[in-house]
Image (tube, rainbow, N blue to C red):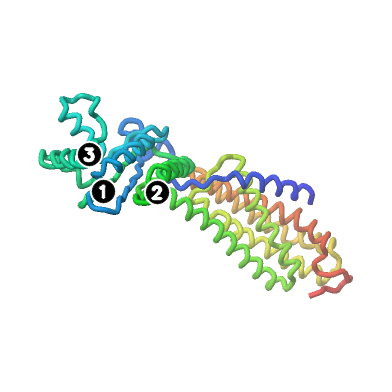
Amino acid sequence: MAFFVILAGVSIAGALNIQVESNTAKMLSKKLPLRQAIDFVDERMGGSMSMEIMLDTGKTDGVKDPAFLKKMDAFQDFVDKHPLTTKTTGVLDVVKKMRRAMHNNDWEFYSVPDTHQAASQYLFLYETSGGDQLDKLVGFDYDIARLTVKTRNLSTADVRKFMQDVEDFSRKTFDDSVSVEVTGALSWVKALNDKIGEGVKYSFTAVLFAVAALMMIFLRSVKLGLISMIPNVFPVLITLGLMGFAGIYLDMPLMCCSAVIIGVAVDDTIHFFRRYRREFKGLGDYKQALRATLSTVGRPITFTTMTLVLGFLVMTLSDMSGWSNFGFLSGFAFLWAYLADFFFCPALILLFKPLGEGKGQMVE
């Protein structure tokens, strides 16, 4: 019991270090053509991910306001110099280029115009000279400015940090009159990451309570039902601990891992505890009932566990790291569920005596 309790405590410490990863590109093996294409775009074409930042002034021609343009210039400069950014594109690039072109391409004039009228003229000149990209950079009434930020393929942790940095700086730069909304691929990755985290909590909690209630009803004993949950919960805990210490991300395939582990491991648990209840009813002695249980259902449980472990380990051959990790961790969990059934649960039964004290009698 001491060994299992200490191992559970260590596993909890490791589980606290788990990071959720919802970037599907990170799940692909580098030998796959799709992953190679993504890496090529990152290295040669400015990045495969992007973030769209919508700056809503809330009024017509608000984008042409020099005060807004200067704030946007400071904001774009911050985003452009961020270590995770490869390139930014916005309406300011057009305005600055037009202003420089009107001053003999002097780089000293590659800056924000000082007046509303000058900004309007530069944008009008761009439209009349054949510029066809302006509708992608500003709203129809010049009330919204769009800033496109290109990045390389980022992990979910980097996405979360990048978006937090952008949101913090935007709050310092713009007043309440400007609404800043972040959209695009990075926002999608962050939203999916949050959904995965919530899904893991809800699925694990729902399965845990459902199985615990069924075991109590099936075994007709609250104490025995709670003890029977040990070999179902313990393998999930130690698997999460391994993920935390080994740096394995909790991605979409692994999201359902905890629910699958409990759902599969409960099969052997039912066999073990159902047989133990029957043996105790006839023998009335905890140790003798354990010996009789292990000598009867021990062999089929062993063979079942071997089959599950080997069957799930086949998935480690997958080129998708998420499914490969799923196969390895599932096999690892089923092995520990087997050890908990054979060592941890008997110790708990002998300590707490969930079926009463009397010889040959059982407390329902």
Alpha-carbon span between mark 2 and mark 3: 34 Å
Q: Is residue 153 left or right of residue 297?
A: left
List x then y, in percent, for residue 220. Answer: 73, 73
- Residue 312 falls left or right of residue 219: left
The residue closer to the viewer here, 123 or 149, is 123
Name which of mark 2 and mark 1 comes first in the sequence: 1
Which of 174/131 is in front? 174
- On residue 356, the disc is none
Mark whose residue sits in front, 2 or 3? 3
Mark 1 surroundings: few (<14), some (14-19) or many (≥20) residues within 10 A: many
At numbered mark 1, what does the secondary structure look like: helix, strand or loop?
Answer: helix
- Compared to residue 116, the image places residue 105 above or below, namely above
Mark 3 vs mark 1, foreground winner is: 3
Classify residue 32 as left or right of residue 226. Answer: left
Q: Residue 81: horizontal and vertical position, in percent?
A: 38, 32
Q: Which residue is mark 3?
A: 115
The image quadrant where one finds the C terminus is: bottom right
Where in the figure is residue 300, as x and y percent of width and height? 68, 58
Q: Which comes sooner in the sequence, label 2 or label 3?
A: 3
State the residue position of label 1: 62
